[in-house]
Amino acid sequence: MTTTMTLAKAITAGLDKVLEGNDKAILMGEDIGKLGGVYRITEGLQAKYGAHRVIDSPLGEAGIVGSAVGMALRGHSPLVEIQFDGFVFPAFSQITTQLAKMHARSEGRLTTPVVIRIPYGGGIGSIEHHSESPEALFVHTAGLRVITPSNANDAYWMIQQAAACPDPVIYFEPKRRYWLKGEVDTETPALDAFKAQVVRSGDDATIVAYGPLVPVALAAAEAALEDGRSIEVIDLRSLSPIDFDTITESVQKTGRLIVTHEAPTFGGLGGEIAARVTERAFLSLEAPVLRVGGFHMPYPISKVESQYLPDIDKLLEALDRSFAY
């Protein structure tokens, strides 16, 4: 069955399916119960499943994640909500030194199937700690899987796939796309959450994007048609592991690659993709791999965030530079 949902409500529906199908699944987070969370992602779930399964936690991210680690070791499947991207840092030690390491530390005897949901990215007229993109910090940490949907159908299925994964999963939610509507097929599962997807075919250049910038990349590809350029767009979907096979195959066809993300380009995920593609497809490249991202600075005030965030014009300018070679 196919139905139209916003990305936010698709996550809600996906969480509902997780709770319905696994009595060991538990939601935890600040204000997620009666209120339904800041963005109302968990709205109605406490009333349906009870306060013992949709738990309003104290204000303390380190305690939330630490408790989730312990619960996972006792056989539960916690799904944790972090209210805003910048609020995750009090729990960073728990995530990177405990959650990510437990499987290796126990030589494979223990698993920690914890999902940590983090709304991330800008474009909502907010401030620092409410608009950041810290994904590179988690991608750099071995032992974590990191994924992000860009549309409602993926949001619905990827949260369920994350909950079914025996490894800890960081599930980044593009908050400025929460209200983006799309068709959700509730019967046919989406592509494997840890695979990239070609969402627009093209022959002249490839744009790799993820999360909030996939609609921007698609719009830039459409605009590039006016110049007679056929642009392929890849939705990365999984940030760790990265599906380099799909990217490499595309670049071998198009010869050009632009990587875009809201996070600063310095030290960002685009640098890793650029390096790996250069190693794997150097002889296919007609130009250097180019990156389009945020500046290496704290997230700016809302009045100027439009100048900070990658947009259609910045992507088209990068395409012009690529085709100039």
Image (spheres, helix red, strand yellow):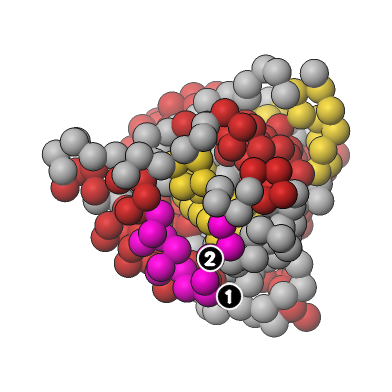
Residue at 64% from the left image edge and 65% from the top image edge:
31
Magenta stretch holds residue 64: yes
Which label belongs to residue 57?
2
Counting residues from the start of the chain, the first of labels 1 and 2 encountered is 2
Q: Which residue is mark 1?
A: 129
Three-letter code for the amino acid on which mark 1 is drawn: His
Q: Residues within 10 Å of mark 2 (few under 14, many from 20)?
A: some
Of marks 1 and 2, the one in the foreground: 2
Residue 132 lies in quadrant: bottom right
Is residue 324 at all visible to an observer of this figure? no
- Residue 130: percent from left, percent from top: 63, 72
Residues 76 and 124: in front is 76
**Residue 214 versus residue 201 in the image, above or below:** below
Residue at 67% from the left image edge and 51% from the top image edge:
46
At mark 1, the secondary structure is: loop
Please state the extent of the stretch shown in magenta in the rendering: 55-68
**Residue 131 versus residue 189 in the image, above or below:** below
Residue 166 lies in quadrant: top left
Residues 128 and 209: in front is 128
Residues 162 and 191: in front is 162
